[in-house]
């Protein structure tokens, strides 16, 4: 097998030789270079393109990198900038602290802050054995990795845009609204281009993997995985609400078409349950249009955006999320950790929540099934207890620490192929 060399004539792990053949990064302990008398770890350079506040997607990225780190894998995570609370020893900010305020004052789309990161990313590639890029990373970063000739790994946090567009076009049409989801032929083509450049793609759920294969990604490139949850952030409740209290359902997330909130509101109204539906998140305009009447019901409570969702989980008997398009929603892991009975869609369940074992999995557009399962959960305390207990036990296998360790082993094995 051919070996490529850098300008000094030394071979580079993971480089592409002039004959076009890529060779593997050798990550075995016996073959790692010796530095200072110790075996050096494989070095992974990661780039997350948005402001790092350790919330939402940045929380996923930081958590995965934190626990993928190990004796055999060193990670540098480059971000445009970070909140003080989100900084870690392996996180590098690209925008200097003294420039952060003026840059973000004018940089509403974050394009400028990403371009600040590009020169630092290029310099950091010199010490990297592989690169790890997240969603919305500009093509210039992909070009930089190709120029360095090292393996590229992509994180695919949702279904392929082609699949997402098909699902959401249908959902908006059913709701009688023009499609509003940000996907089009141009963004689909860009995603195809990025995926062609990748040696490997992390996929957080089986349906994401299916969408990638449908888009032409070779199955051997896909690294099936999951996301997780943090016991430090999510404090599982000591006990469920009393069965004597009114039945309470919780939904957490963006309140709109994509997450199926309109389907939940419709099913809740039709179920006729004497209880309460709690909605935690920002109400999107499309939901205000299609579900305005349901949102005004006296048994529906909009909690708004919550900085701490533990209190909302503690109030609920069940968590319901008939989401239409996802990767692997963190709120499902968190509801499982709290021991709630869960009703969700195949997109929400992924491979983590097992139908009839840890929760109930139904098609989001199956209105009769959603109504029937809401009624069953409301009336059957033993069912809620059984599903919740199993979900809590299952969640223990998906802490970020365990997910990160599995990913580290998976990535190192892939780089050795």
Image (cartoon, grey):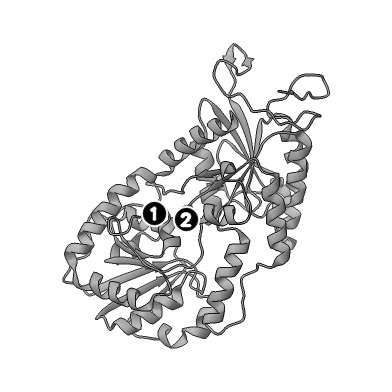
Q: Quick one: 115 or 371, which is closer to the camera?
A: 371
For the N terminus, which image quadrant? top right
Residue 63 seen by the camera: yes
SS of the residue under disc 1 = helix
Residue 126 picture location, percent across and down: 74, 30
Residue 252 picture location, percent across and down: 42, 66
In the rendered structure, are the residues bearing label 2 and label 1 in contact, judged by CB atoms less than 8 Å apart? yes
Q: Quick one: 320 or 186, which is closer to the camera?
A: 186
Q: Which mark is residue 328?
A: 2
SS of the residue under disc 2 = loop
Q: Residues within 10 Å of mark 1 (few under 14, many from 20)?
A: many
Number of dots carrying numbers: 2
Residue 2 picture location, percent across and down: 74, 23
Which residue occupies 39% across, 54% down?
Answer: 333
Residue 278 picture location, percent across and down: 36, 73
Which residue occupies 57% across, 14% down?
Answer: 38
């Amino acid at each position: 097998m051919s070996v490529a060399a850098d300008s000094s004539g030394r071979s580079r792990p993971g480089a592409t030789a002039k004959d076009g053949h890529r060779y593997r990064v050798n990550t075995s302990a016996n073959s790692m270079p010796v530095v200072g008398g110790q075996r050096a770890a494989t070095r992974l350079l990661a780039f997350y393109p948005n402001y790092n506040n350790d919330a939402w997607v940045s929380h996923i990225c930081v958590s995965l990198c934190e626990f993928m780190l190990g004796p055999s894998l060193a990670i540098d995570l480059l971000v445009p900038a970070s909140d003080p609370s989100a900084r870690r020893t392996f996180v590098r900010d690209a925008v200097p602290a003294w420039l952060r305020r003026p840059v973000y004052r004018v940089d509403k789309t974050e394009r400028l802050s990403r371009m600040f990161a590009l020169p630092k990313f290029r310099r950091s590639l010199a010490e990297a054995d592989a690169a790890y890029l997240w969603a919305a990373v500009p093509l210039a970063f992909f070009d930089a990795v190709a120029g360095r000739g090292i393996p590229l790994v992509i994180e695919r946090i949702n279904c392929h845009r082609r699949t997402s567009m098909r699902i959401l076009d249908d959902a908006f049409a059913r709701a009688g609204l023009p499609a509003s989801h940000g996907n089009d032929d141009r963004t689909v083509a860009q995603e195809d281009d990025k995926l062609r450049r990748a040696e490997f793609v992390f996929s957080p759920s089986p349906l994401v993997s299916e969408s990638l294969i449908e888009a032409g990604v070779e199955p051997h490139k896909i690294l099936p995985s999951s996301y997780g949850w943090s016991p430090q952030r999510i404090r599982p409740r000591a006990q469920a609400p009393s069965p004597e209290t009114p039945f309470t359902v919780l939904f957490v997330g963006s309140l709109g078409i994509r997450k199926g909130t309109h389907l939940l509101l419709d099913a809740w109204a039709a179920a006729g349950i004497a209880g309460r539906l709690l909605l935690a998140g920002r109400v999107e305009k499309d939901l205000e249009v299609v579900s305005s009447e349901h949102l005004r019901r006296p048994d529906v409570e909009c909690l708004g955006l919550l900085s701490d969702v533990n209190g909302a989980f503690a109030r609920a008997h069940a968590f319901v999320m008939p989401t239409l398009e996802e990767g692997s929603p963190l709120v499902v892991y968190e509801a499982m950790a709290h021991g709630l009975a869960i009703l969700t869609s195949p997109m929400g369940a992924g491979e983590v929540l097992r139908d009839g074992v840890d929760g109930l999995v139904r098609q989001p557009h199956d209105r009769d099934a959603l109504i029937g399962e809401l009624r069953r959960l409301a009336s059957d305390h033993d069912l809620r207890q059984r599903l919740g207990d199993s979900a809590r036990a299952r969640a223990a296998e998906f802490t970020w620490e365990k997910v990160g360790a599995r990913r580290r082993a998976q990535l190192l094995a892939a780089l050795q192929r």
